């Protein structure tokens, strides 16, 4: 059994893992809400081009699992659980850092790829693909935008959709209700940057907790191994 100052490390490790577990649950809830509420918009943009709900769910599940593993290892003072937790958490931190680097590296191509996805959506809005129509309508209502750059983007493909109306109701276009002046690409990029900063801050806090968890886990596992060696030798 660990004693003295290491006992403090044990409970600090438990507390850090509890925070990690709660943070993981928070990411799972956030990812689920994002998936349910903005699924149409994400489908239109190309889900892989944004910080996807699936990514939040995966990271949240990993944090929850590792938090639970770390709590069990700390309370039970189990060497195998503690070492496994430290190794897996270090790997997760490495993957998170790599994901951030890749995200910044691909940031320059985001505008081009997003514009291409929206352009393809314009072509199929009036087709039999009801999913594209619903996605565009949901996007324009939520982001309060019209077209890619402005409402004139719709002219080559037919009439301006009623979802562009600032005061939406059936037949609003024929009633000459004003349409949103900004294009969707501008509002989507602003929304992505704002939410990206928020998520980045949350991930930075979780990464700090994870790093503390690795340090505490190493200290605790070393103490457990030393006590085991002293007990038998």
Image (tube, rainbow, N blue to C red):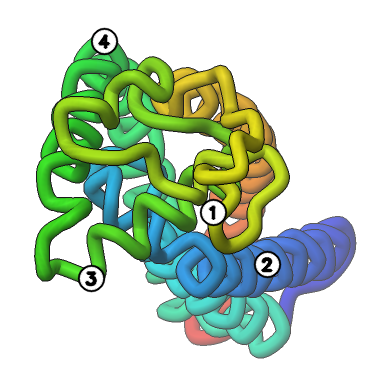
Q: Which residue is mark 3?
A: 130
Asked whether the viewer can see residue 233, the reply is yes
Q: Is residue 1 left or right of residue 218?
A: right
The quadrant holding residue 135 is bottom left
Residue 165's x, y, as percent?
59, 41
Question: Label 4: how many residues lie within 10 Å, few (<14), some (14-19) or many (20+)?
Answer: few
Quadrant of residue 115 within the rendered picture: top left
Q: Which mark lies nearer to you, 4 or 2?
A: 4
Residue at 59% across, 28% down: 180
Circle 4 residue? 108
Circle number at residue 26: 2
Which labelled disc corresponds to residue 13?
A: none
Q: Which mark is first along the chain, 1 or 4?
A: 4
Residue 10 visible? The answer is: no
Mark 4 or 2 closer to N-term? 2
Can you say whether 148 is above or below 218 in the image? Answer: above
Where, quadrant-wise, is the N terminus in this rendering?
A: bottom right
Q: Which residue is mark 1?
A: 218
- Indicate which disc, 4 or 3, sits on the residue closer to the N terminus: 4
Q: Does the CB distance between marks 1 and 3 fall below 8 Å?
A: no
Does residue 73 appear left or right of residue 229 in this picture?
right
> Which comes before the other along the chain, label 2 or label 1?
2
């Amino acid at each position: 059994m660990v004693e003295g100052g290491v006992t403090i490390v044990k409970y600090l490790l438990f507390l850090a893992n509890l925070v990690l577990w709660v943070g993981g649950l928070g990411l799972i809830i956030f990812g689920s809400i994002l998936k349910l509420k903005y699924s149409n918009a994400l489908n239109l943009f190309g889900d892989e081009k944004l910080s996807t709900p699936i990514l939040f769910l995966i990271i949240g599940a990993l944090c929850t699992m590792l938090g639970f593993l770390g709590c069990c290892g700390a309370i039970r003072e189990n060497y195998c659980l503690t070492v496994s937790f430290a190794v897996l958490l270090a790997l997760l931190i490495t993957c998170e850092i790599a994901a951030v680097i890749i995200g910044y590296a691909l940031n320059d191509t985001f505008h081009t790829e997003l514009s291409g996805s929206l352009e393809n959506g314009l072509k199929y809005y009036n087709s039999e693909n009801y999913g594209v129509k619903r996605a565009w309508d949901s996007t324009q209502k939520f982001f309060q935008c019209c077209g890619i750059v402005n409402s004139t983007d719709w002219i080559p493909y037919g009439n301006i959709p009623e979802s562009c109306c600032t005061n939406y109701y059936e037949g609003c276009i024929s009633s000459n209700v004003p349409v949103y002046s900004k294009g969707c690409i501008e509002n989507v990029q602003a929304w992505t940057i704002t939410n990206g900063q928020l998520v980045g801050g949350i991930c930075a806090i979780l990464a700090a907790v994870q790093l503390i968890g690795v340090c505490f886990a190493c200290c605790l596992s070393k103490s457990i191994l030393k006590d085991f060696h002293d007990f038998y030798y």
